[in-house]
Amino acid sequence: MSNRRQVFGRWGEDAAAEYLTANGYTVLARNVHSAHGEIDIVASKDGLLVFVEVKTRSSHTFAYPEDSVTRRKQAYMLSAAEEYLQAHPESGESWQFDVIAVEGTPGGKTQIEHFENVIG
């Protein structure tokens, strides 16, 4: 991945983390690596553990950010979350997956859309 794309992705993850914090979530971890992939953000709110996939795009000309969370990506997210839960048994039993779509550019207008409990 190019440095420019990494910087842009990090900006989106920062925007998502700020959004979560402003909406009453506690960010517990970021960029959690596992054998099955990476969890962008692990957060909690009201006793619920939330695994967050962040998708960042400069615009939705070709597709909306959330459209890139395919069934295959969801399977990787589930495997990574299971690994996290095994490593952190204190996390509790209530958890869900959310997707945060960030659209915009650093220094410009940013639009954030939060999709809760996306894997049933």
Image: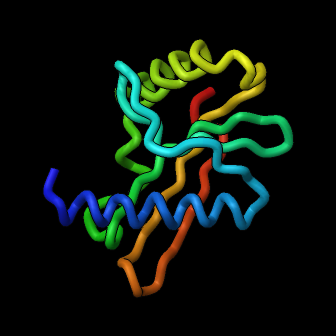
Res 42 → quadrant? top right
Q: Position of residue 56 (x, y in %)?
A: 38, 60
- Seen in the picture, residue 51 relative to 76 is either above or below; the reply is below
Which residue, as the protein is rendered here, is positioned at the far right? Answer: 46
Q: Position of residue 55 (x, y in %)?
A: 41, 54
Q: Which residue is depicted at the point 46% across and 58% down?
A: 13
User: Which sits in the foreground, 84 or 115?
Assistant: 84
Res 60 → quadrant? bottom left
User: Which sits in the foreground, 36 or 65?
Assistant: 36
Q: Which residue is depicted at the point 17% across and 60% down?
A: 3
- Seen in the picture, residue 36 relative to 53 is either above or below; the reply is above
User: Which sits in the foreground, 19 or 116?
Assistant: 19
**In the displayed structure, does residue 94 sit left or right of residue 13?**
right
Q: Position of residue 7 (x, y in %)?
A: 29, 64
Q: Which residue is depicted at the point 29% across and 70% down?
A: 61
Which residue, as the protein is rendered here, is positioned at the far top? Answer: 86
Q: Which residue is depicted at the point 32% across and 72% down?
A: 58
Q: Quadrant of the image for the C terminus?
A: top right
- Seen in the picture, residue 56 relative to 72 is either above or below; the reply is below
Res 106 → quadrant? bottom left
